[in-house]
Amino acid sequence: MHSNGLAALGVLGQDGPQSIVDLVFHNARRKAATPAIEWPAGKLTYGDLAPLILRTSFHLRSLGVGVGDPVAIALGDHVDHLVALLAVAAMGAVILPIDVRWTETEKAAVAHAFGAVLALVDDGATPIADLANSANDAAWHSSVAAAPLDLDLFVRGRARPLALSLSSGTTGRPKGPLATHGHILNRLYIYTASLGFGSTDRFMVASPLYFGGARYMSLAYLCLGGTLVLYPPPYTPRGLIDAMQQHDITSLFLVPTILRRLLETPFEGEMMFPRLRRLVSSGAVLHADERRAVKQKICGNFMNFYSSTEGGGVSVLDADAPDELSGSIGRVVLGTEVEVVDDQHQPVATGSTGRVRYRGGSVAAGYHLDPEASKEAFRDGWYYPGDLAHFDADGFLFLDGRSKDMIIRGGVNIYPHEIEEVLMRHAEVREAAATAMTSAELGEEVVAFVVLHRPLEQQKLLEYCRLQLAPYKVPKLIVQVDELPRNSSGKVLKAKLQELLVRQP
């Protein structure tokens, strides 16, 4: 980096990093020859990455992007996607992630809702309607290569907006928390202290970069000076197992859906990922039996990470937590304050269920351009994710469901998670989800949806539930389905289940 005149950009000064790109440039000073990103066709060292970021930023400015402008990044899971994230961040513009799997209508709706001035799309992809588009084609790469290294383009400031990310639970009008550079820099505390990320790790990016977990963990490793190895989906479980060994991966993030596929894959060895130092999962509920199986078959150092797009990490269940705590989502991470409160926003007693709220340096201040949604989810500096939970006496947090998913049967609150846990313990049940159905007599009744390993009569499952649950919690109906509808992060879409329920005879 010294040879190209960019050395000054890697000097952090007494105030430390003011941008996530500060740390990437810092790594170009201290470990220029270390691979930053590897993929099947090549690699970029930190020394290569730093000037590429600046040249890409200059090209974006030539296309009309200014400081504070949202840029829709509708790119696949490849190196251009990561460079675009950093280039937008470096010039002080705002990242707006767009999932390439969305329909053209969905892409346009989100891009226009957040005022994107430009969309970056893959070569050959359909442009986003009524918006300036630029594809990562040969002309794009030629223009970037010819762009000057304009050091004045680099905009710093911890309070500057960095990214607008759609919440994974979003329904209806899109909601996007606005994360600043400071928020993401604060998440480094969580990733290093509570998850153990390190600068010598080789982190495989095996989840879509649109998903917040993959995106922010990838950026964290580039800030720390680790190496990203791109292995984008779709892939087979066997392909992932082989790739992990081939690339000597030490750190990995997977959503529960992929973990379940791995658990169903025949494997003769003792452990699927014997060299892996850290396996992190987040994005959806992982049941207690599944956690035990992952530790036994996939990776002994498995961490279940409870987090959100709005606030980053909340809690983590470490690998060394005893087996009887496998149903917990762990203890609160470093740098985040968590409370469980009642409807009057007062903390509840240990063991009592209430609404989760949390605050800290990683938590966004609200939803961009949506004061009504912000008023509901953000209050007095706290973020309310909509989850119900309780703490035990040792500070372990247990999820009891979503406040909007809670079933109220005859005035009694029933938490779907409890019913799902019982069903998941049945040998023939692969997946389960509980929700409410309308009842003229009781207001709501419990209905459960199950994915089975092999056909089983509904009555058999109902008899099993009667042995495990109080009478008022036993499902009125159990529906067998081929699969549960999920979003990109693996969360079950209970609204879709309600639609299935309407169509039941």
Image (cartoon, grey):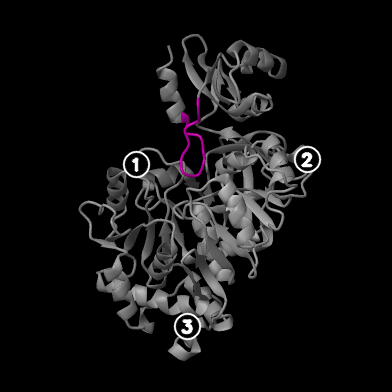
Badge 3 element: helix
Badge 1 element: loop
First reached walking from the N terminus: tag 1 or tag 2? 1
For disc 1, the marked residue is 173
Residue 465 spot, x, y in % from top left: 66, 17
Q: Which residues are magenta?
A: 482-494
**In this rendering, the label closer to the viewer, 3 or 2:** 2
The relative height of residue 292 versus residue 51 in the rendered view (above or below) is: above
The relative height of residue 40 versus residue 326 in the rendered view (above or below) is: below
First reached walking from the N terminus: tag 1 or tag 3? 3
Residue 114 spot, x, y in % from top left: 32, 53
Check contact, mark 3 vs mark 2: CB within 8 A. no
The relative height of residue 427 versus residue 314 in the rendered view (above or below) is: above
Q: Which mark is residue 9?
A: 3
What's the residue at 62%, 37% (across, down)? 264
Please state which amino acid type lies under the numbered disc 1. Arg
In which quadrant of the rendered view does residue 13 lie? bottom right
Q: Give whichever of 411, 55 is nearer the camera.
A: 55
Cα–Cα gap, marks 3 and 2: 48 Å
Taking the image as shown, residue 172 lies to the left or right of residue 108, namely right
Cα–Cα gap, marks 1 and 3: 40 Å
In which quadrant of the rendered view does residue 348 lie? top right
Please state which amino acid type lies under the numbered disc 2. Asp
For disc 2, the marked residue is 323
Cα–Cα gap, marks 1 and 2: 41 Å
Residue 20 spot, x, y in % from top left: 50, 70
Q: Give whichever of 356, 167 is nearer the camera.
A: 167
